[in-house]
Amino acid sequence: MELPSQYNPKETEDKIYQLWQESGFFNPDNLPSRHKKPFCIIMPPTNANGNLHAGHALVMTIEDIMTRYKRMQGYKALWLPGLDHAGFETQVVYEKKLEKEGRSRFKMTPQELYKEIYDFTETNKANIESQVKKMGASCDWSRKKFTLDQDVIDTVYSTFEKFKKDGLVYRGKKIINWCPKHQTSLSDLETKDDERTDKFYYLKYGPFTIATARPETKFGDKYVVMHPKDKRYSQYKEGQKIDLEWINGPITATVIKDEAIDMDFGTGVMTITPWHDPVDFEIAQRHNLDKEQIIDFQGRLLPIAGEFAGMKIAEARPKIIEKLQTKGLVEKIDENYKHVVKVCYKCNSLIEPQIKEQWFLKMKPLAEPAIKAIKKGDVKFVPSHYKKIALHWLNNILDWPLSRQIVWGIPIPGDESGDTFDTWFSSGQWPYAALGYPKSKDFKTFYPTDVMETGGDLIFFWVSRMIMFGLYNTGKVPFKYVYMHGLVLDSKGQKMSKSKGNVINPLDLTEKFGTDALRMALVVGNTPGTSLPLDENKIKGYRNFANKIWNASRFILMQEEKRQATKNDKKLLKEFEKISKDIAKDMDNFRFYSAAEKIYHYFWHTFCDKIIEDYKKGEVGYDAIFEILTKSLRVLHPFMPFITEHIYQQLPIDKKQKSIMVEAWPK
């Protein structure tokens, strides 16, 4: 048997993937009888709103390595693929598309917008599926799920009803994060902190001086609040009325004493705007005070602002200060006030807190069992420091606003305003929903799943919520291990972004160097939880390695005069056995970076540079190098599935299994 002189990934990879699909072995039900013990990974559902990026390529690589390794070890391995409707994320992507076309979602009916986004995601779903296949993913396509599949929606609704029945879901008028650009509420996790330098205004409010960075919110301020133990203001009594001149004329203010006031900040006195500030809202709740809206949901001042009504904040702010100055009510202005503001994580618009009736989920009763399970070790984190991060968030958890004022997603049942669920409410139920909870055979066989592999940035958004939801609905944690990968950076170590123009399309790299080379480049040196710079030179190095594997295999298969066994053979086979066990230990402990590097060095520097050269000198027998080759291909297979399968198919051996992916891991 002779291999062609060169290995050409472009010509072979699609054919190999087709061979795998036709074998049926991606489906655990079709695996040989030795595959008994279940092993399951549920793929984090890729957002159905674009193409795969380098981060997705890493996800597909790591999860495929785990699945192929376990399958070879004799596990009944299921890797279930899926896609996410991704609610707000997808609607934002589609709104950008509309903007480029000179259209706006606000000029469309909800039905028209939903239909357009649905068609958009359907196209993307097919595209992403083909890209996932290009990465060599050995997932079971017969079980693929979408977070808008009817059975997933039914599970989401059933959970919502259960929460209501248990008194964990409530509808209330509370303060929420509002994005004026996207016209929707956001959870705290969907906002980000932005440090800014603004002006800080010290204003005269009757006998007091108050300090604010947001004078535009002050039109409705009629409560002046101080700490009950602040001796500077001991002469003022709770409930005392004070007449004073304010922005648009005389008002009567009421004194409120509350321990939330920081005596060391500013003057130790503040007025409150309960509609537009969460701290002020809590003070108003405690003292049963009025709450008045000053800024509308489009970010414009309301009629309470008098002559400033209808103005955007940026336009109104200097004019309000000018008016206060003419009245002698500006004491001083600090020009360089550094502070942190909340912005929308998608568009960077300033978040405007608003009071709005929404659905909320009580999180503390859900967090308590999750905290216990994590502390007990029912869920283990790789790397381990994520345990501390998850516990800190769970111990300080706030109620979750579930409503989103967007069209795309799962509608909240019985919601008159047509709101949809926060996308994380459905994806938080992904492990058991994807397996057909509660009655399906898959749920009974594969739940709890073994590993959830995802990015460290999703520890709060998704991982912690899946643990809470899994325990609440099934009584069990949804997975035993959480493996956190880091970001894939560009070759200079910078985060990839469209604005920087440094986004790497993984399929461009597979086209150029072959998928196996990209997979190795993504794994070697990639310790869990740390970011990885992706350099073309590194991928090129592993393309050279693929060629080395090809040439070594070609040389061995071309040997016509088979050399007899030698005294060195047993020793070499024992050494390989030791290496194989060592690599298996790395794999079992999620050290894929180390396992990949070890087999790379062994194959190139020991097998090719030494053992094959010794064979040429007559110091090693043919059976020994042939056995080491076949076993090396099996160890390499989880990392470099295409070339190992291609060579396996040419080996002069009895192929009862039809594919290397169900051959046994070498003992």
Image (spheres, rainbow, N blue to C red):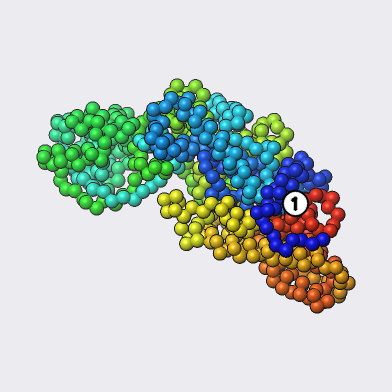
**Closer to the camera in the image, 496 or 573:** 496
Q: Position of residue 621 (x, y in %)?
A: 84, 71
**Closer to the camera in the image, 606 or 461:** 606
Question: Which residue was labeled with disc 1?
Answer: 661
Q: Position of residue 421 (x, y in %)?
A: 50, 31
Residue at (56% x, 27% y) in the render: 157
Residue at (28% x, 29% y) in the render: 292
Q: Quadrant of residue 150?
A: top right
Residue at (79% x, 46% y) in the render: 35
User: Label 1: few (<14), some or many (≥20) within 10 Å?
Assistant: many
SS for callout 1: helix
Whether residue 473 sits left or right of residue 578 in the image: it is: left
Q: Position of residue 219 (x, y in %)?
A: 22, 33
Amino acid under disc 1: Met
- Residue 87 in view of the camera: yes
Residue at (59% x, 63% y) in the render: 540
- Residue 208 in view of the camera: no
Does 638 appear above or below 250? below
The count of marks equals: 1
